[in-house]
Image (spheres, rainbow, N blue to C red):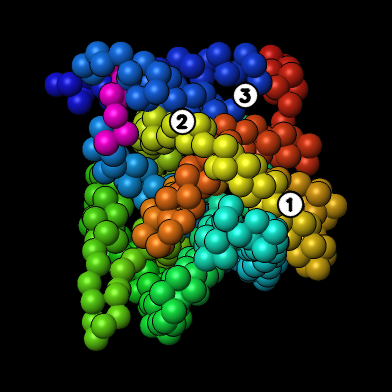
């Protein structure tokens, strides 16, 4: 009953605070995150009232299954954008931009942090600098998708953005595996080709393969039913099953094998949406069902933000440096690669800003990086600090960029249109 009460408080708090956010012109995602911060162990949770907030970060982690489910549905929704018609229009540009902006961001953050290392070796190690550079490539698809949905954004920039965000996760996975392998070699003195090259490629291939199988299974199961409610239930069940299977890890011949939850669910949705003739209507119904789940996801994400890291001056200094260099890398990387692909001025100018949010994927990488000898905890703290900033500011910047690009209808014009209708 206590867990149910806590979830109810999270859901209602996030929704009520979103009304205030609307009056201030802020995205609802920001309101959900702030609600989580308020209910977290550093605010209301510190009062120790049972069910009213979270008394510790461990208590927030107990609800991890909800966050995993939400990430699965977020990836499932983004996979819907990979329809063949969309890919024919901008698939080449999305792949080029997705790869180049991630690589440029990693290179720029690496250069800045390695410069600090050579200037003040005691502040950050070379291994930590390389690891942070790879983590910088990751972008949060959840916040981006929620802003797009809330404001019904549509246009060339929005459609390209959703494709780039999806590709970014695969690229980020490879960059992190390679960089973390090199960083581990610097600290231990031994280089593992398996962990640097083989394992990340195996993870991507396994994830795409599982996604194809689950997409075919979903299509077959959906055709056994004709009622809308049962088809919706099948979709929810298959996504939940896919999330569960994606958490499986095993070892074959000394190679650690696992799956990327986001890649699996995106591929599953991509296959399903391209072979099922009624997928578009069904995806619309799934989107409506998942709204409360997404609210809980962002409230829980806000509650997970560790405010204790703000006490460490070194974390603040390196965190600000990381945020500034990553932001510059994302903007310049997106601008340059979009110009290379011949994209419109609006896309070139604003795509990089929409790629700034960072959360779940980066936190997962930071958790792995925590095992890095010496500076592992420092890396995790810097990423936590950056996520705190990016999650609170990123959605607002995404909204502003899409508005400036003309892909969000201004509030006043929308209201006037409704009255005339």
As drawn, 38 above or below 88:
above
The residue tagged 3 is 26
Secondary element type, mark 3: loop
Taking the spot 29% from the left edge, 75% from the top edge, the residue there is 256
Q: Regarding mark 1 in the picture, which secondary structure is present there?
A: helix
Labelled disc at residue 319: none
Q: Secondary structure at mark 2?
A: helix
In the rendered view of the protein, which quadrant contains the C terminus? Answer: top right
Query: 190 and 8: which one is in front?
Result: 190
Residue that numbered label 2 is attached to: 307
The span picked out in magenta is 52-58
Does the stretch in magenta take in 72? Answer: no
Q: Residue 399 in the image: x percent, y percent?
A: 67, 35
Q: In the depicted view, which residue is nearer to us: 151 or 397?
A: 397
Q: Is residue 413 left or right of residue 204?
A: right
**Which circle, 2 or 3, is nearer the viewer?**
2
Q: Residues within 10 Å of mark 2 (few under 14, many from 20)?
A: some
Mark earlier in primary sequence (2, 3): 3
Residue 242 as seen in the image, left or right of residue 321: left
- Reading the chain from its start, which is encountered first: label 3 or label 1? 3
| Dot 1 alpha-carbon crowd within 10 angstroms: few under 14, some 14 to 19, many 20 or more | some
How far across and down, in percent of the image, does residue 40 sit? 37, 25
Give the residue pinned by disc 1. 328
């Amino acid at each position: 009953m206590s867990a149910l009460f806590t979830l109810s408080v999270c859901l209602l708090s996030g929704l009520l605070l979103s009304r205030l956010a609307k009056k201030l012109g802020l995205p609802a995602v920001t309101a959900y995150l702030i609600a989580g911060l308020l209910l977290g162990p550093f605010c209301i949770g510190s009062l120790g009232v049972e069910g009213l907030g979270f008394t510790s970060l461990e208590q927030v982690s107990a609800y991890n299954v909800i966050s995993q489910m939400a990430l699965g549905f977020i990836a499932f929704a983004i996979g819907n954008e990979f329809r063949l018609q969309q890919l024919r229009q901008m698939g080449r540009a999305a792949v080029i931009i997705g790869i180049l902006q991630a690589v440029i961001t990693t290179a720029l953050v690496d250069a800045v942090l390695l410069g600090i290392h050579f200037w003040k070796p005691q502040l950050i190690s070379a291994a930590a600098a390389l690891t942070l550079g790879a983590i910088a490539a990751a972008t949060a698809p959840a916040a981006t998708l929620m802003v797009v949905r809330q404001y019904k954004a549509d246009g060339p920039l929005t459609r390209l953005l959703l494709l780039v965000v999806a590709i970014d996760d695969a690229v980020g996975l490879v960059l992190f595996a390679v960089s973390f392998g090199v960083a581990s070699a610097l600290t231990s003195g031994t280089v593992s080709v398996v962990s640097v090259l083989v394992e990340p490629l195996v993870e991507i291939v396994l994830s795409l393969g599982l996604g194809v199988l689950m997409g075919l299974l979903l299509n077959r199961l959906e055709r056994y039913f004709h009622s809308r409610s049962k088809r919706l239930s099948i979709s929810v069940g298959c996504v939940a099953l896919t999330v569960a299977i994606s958490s499986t890890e095993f070892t074959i011949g000394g190679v650690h094998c696992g799956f990327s939850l986001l890649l699996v669910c995106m591929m599953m949705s991509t296959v399903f949406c391209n072979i099922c003739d009624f997928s578009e209507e069904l995806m619309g119904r799934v989107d409506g069902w998942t709204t409360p789940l997404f609210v809980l996801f962002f409230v829980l994400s806000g509650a997970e933000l560790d405010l204790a890291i703000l006490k460490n001056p070194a974390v603040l200094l390196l965190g600000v440096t990381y945020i500034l260099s990553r932001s510059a890398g994302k903007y310049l990387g997106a601008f340059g690669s979009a110009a290379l692909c011949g994209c419109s001025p609006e896309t070139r100018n604003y795509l990089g800003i929409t790629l700034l949010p960072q959360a779940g994927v980066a936190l997962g990488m930071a958790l792995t990086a925590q095992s890095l000898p010496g500076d592992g905890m420092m890396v995790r703290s810097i990423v936590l600090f950056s996520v705190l900033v990016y999650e609170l500011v990123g959605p607002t910047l995404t909204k502003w960029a899409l508005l400036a690009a003309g892909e969000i209808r201004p509030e006043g014009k929308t209201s006037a249109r409704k009255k005339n209708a």
